[in-house]
Structure formats: C-alpha cells, structure tokens
Amino acid sequence: MPNPKIVGVYKVKNESRFIEQSLKSVTDICTEIIILDDNSSDDTVEICSSIDKVKEIIKEIIRAFHL
C-alpha cells in the first residue's frame, strides 16, 4: 500500500510575519501545501511561493455567505 498523501491547507491574510516559519514546520509531514489567500497586501504570497511544498496558491477567496 502506498504512503498516504497529506495535504496542508492554510487560509491566510497578511501573514508575512509568521507564514514562513509555520510552513517550514509542516513540510516534513505534508506531501503538499495549498494556500488560500484572502487578498493579502503584504509579502505573504511571495513568501508562500518560495516554499517548495506549496503547490497551489488560490487568491481572492469568494464568500458565498457570512456567518
């Protein structure tokens, strides 16, 4: 049986101060990482894209409804 695939998913907005350390802390256990970026205006997207295991960055999350 092949190894299980573990995908990390982050929902972020303006997390440039913390995101690199956080992503690096999960690279050993995640097969890949997906970023859901909520219109960051800082360097969050650039930092995320520099991490090899980040396979997709989805920008501008559309909210279907508010809770």
Image (cartoon, rainbow, N blue to C red):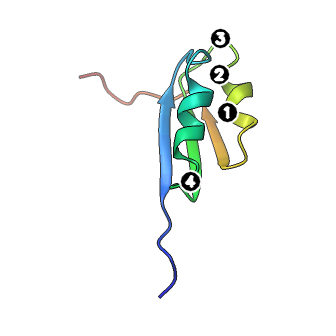
- Front-lying residue, 48 or 28: 28
The residue pinned by badge 4 equals 28
Q: Quadrant of the C terminus?
A: top left
Q: CA distance from mark 1 to mark 2?
A: 6 Å
Residue type, label 3: Ser
Relative vertical location of residue 3 with respect to residue 27 in this rendering, above or below: below
The residue pinned by badge 2 equals 44
Please tell me the numbered disc located at residue 21. Answer: none
Mark 4 vs 3, N-terminal side: 4
Q: CA distance from mark 1 to mark 4?
A: 16 Å
Mark 4 vs 2, N-terminal side: 4
> Mark 1 touching mark 2, by CB under 8 A?
yes
Disc 2, SS: helix
> Mark 2 touching mark 3, by CB under 8 A?
no
User: Of discs 1 and 4, which sits in the foreground?
Assistant: 4
Mark 1 vs 3, N-terminal side: 3
> Mark 4 touching mark 2, by CB under 8 A?
no
Kindly indicate the quadrant of the structure image that contains residue 63.
Answer: top left
The residue pinned by badge 3 equals 41
Q: CA distance from mark 2 to mark 3?
A: 8 Å
Disc 3, SS: loop
Relative vertical location of residue 52 with respect to residue 64 in this rendering, above or below: below
Q: Residue at x 50, y 76 (%)?
A: 3
- Front-lying residue, 36 or 51: 51
Q: CA distance from mark 4 to mark 2?
A: 21 Å
Disc 4, SS: loop
Please tell me the numbered disc located at residue 48. Answer: 1
Residue type, label 4: Asp
Relative vertical location of residue 9 with respect to residue 17 in this rendering, above or below: below
Residue type, label 1: Cys
Q: Residue at x 49, y 36 (%)?
A: 10
Disc 1, SS: helix
